[in-house]
Amino acid sequence: MTAVVVAVDAHEGPVYVPEQDALYFTSLASPDVAIKRLSVSSGEVSVLRADANKANGMALHPDGRLVVCEQGTRSSPARISLVDRATGKAETVVDRWGGLPLNSPNDVVVKSDGSVWFTDPSYGFLQGFRPAPALGDFVYRHDPRTGETTVVAEGFDKPNGLAFSPDERVLYVGDSGESTHRIEAFDVVDGHALTARRVFAVIDPGYPDGLKVDAAGRVYSAGPAGVQVFDPDGHGVGAIAVAGAVNLAFGGAGRIFITADTAVWAATTPDPPQEA
């Protein structure tokens, strides 16, 4: 069962904060991409950052701040930032690799050890708001303890959403290129390296955008056709019919919040999903 929570330009990065019963998300550019906050109980929407440097995917940092993929512009560099949920103040986590600027970071997850994993496709250049890429379309890991950023996976067309399995032994990465349209899985070795690359699922119709994994290990893939759900072996086990789904977040009490450009939707399930 699905229902509109609020009609609003909700595009990406939904992050649910239980103690506030609030959903943070990034908007479409109108004229600038903003980070907004939805009070689920009241339906009130407020603006945390009015100009968020074309922010896209987000995650919650252990210290309570938002980890934000800022895609950047032609004049403002792309970066991964930390944004204070009270003040909107942002600070840079990483904005380059090997001395070269990032392309346009798309989505991000934070592992239990505090490391930040993110995808960096060249969509910004293809969509005309970023310079030509100086780097490949990679998946990165940033270690906040050492300050080191490393490429952990390459060979994608357009790496997009990513999520860890509940035990963090598997990383799922969606490839939303024109001819790929699949979710790949990697084994995580020693907590920081990836191996045993394989195709987990092919998304048809559409392509994989935002990804989430619940406590049972089920993988949720948002895309133009809605949210497709797979068991840990890659078999389809269900779907949530929200046309133009972009990303999702688990919201407790059997709720899944889904962003779809023009609205935030809530799906309720008889088997309540819990975030991994």
Image: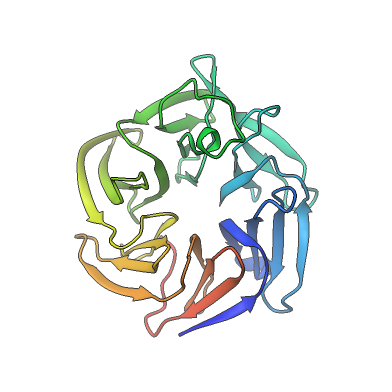
Q: Is residue 143 above or below residue 60?
A: above
Position in image of residue 128 (x %, y %): 58, 36
- Residue 169: tell me if it is visible: no
Position in image of residue 193 (x %, y %): 31, 32
Q: Tell which of 204 and 252 is nearer to you.
A: 204
Q: Quadrant of the image for the N terminus?
A: bottom left
Position in image of residue 170 (x %, y %): 29, 47
Q: Please state the total of marks drawn on the protein image.
A: 0
Position in image of residue 46 (x %, y %): 78, 63
Considering every residue shown, the one lying at the far right of the view is 87
Q: How is the image coloured?
A: rainbow
Q: Tell which of 133 and 235 is nearer to you.
A: 133
Q: Residue at x 70, y 34 (%)?
A: 91
Q: Is residue 64 above or below residue 76?
A: below
Q: Quadrant of the image for the C terminus?
A: bottom left
**Which picture quadrant has residue 14?**
bottom right
Relative placement, left or right, of 206 versus 266 is left
Relative placement, left or right, of 31 versus 67 is right
Considering every residue shown, the one lying at the far top of the view is 99
Q: Residue at x 53, y 32 (%)?
A: 125
Q: Residue at x 37, y 47 (%)?
A: 176
- Residue 241: tell me if it is visible: yes
Q: Is residue 213 above or below residue 161?
A: below
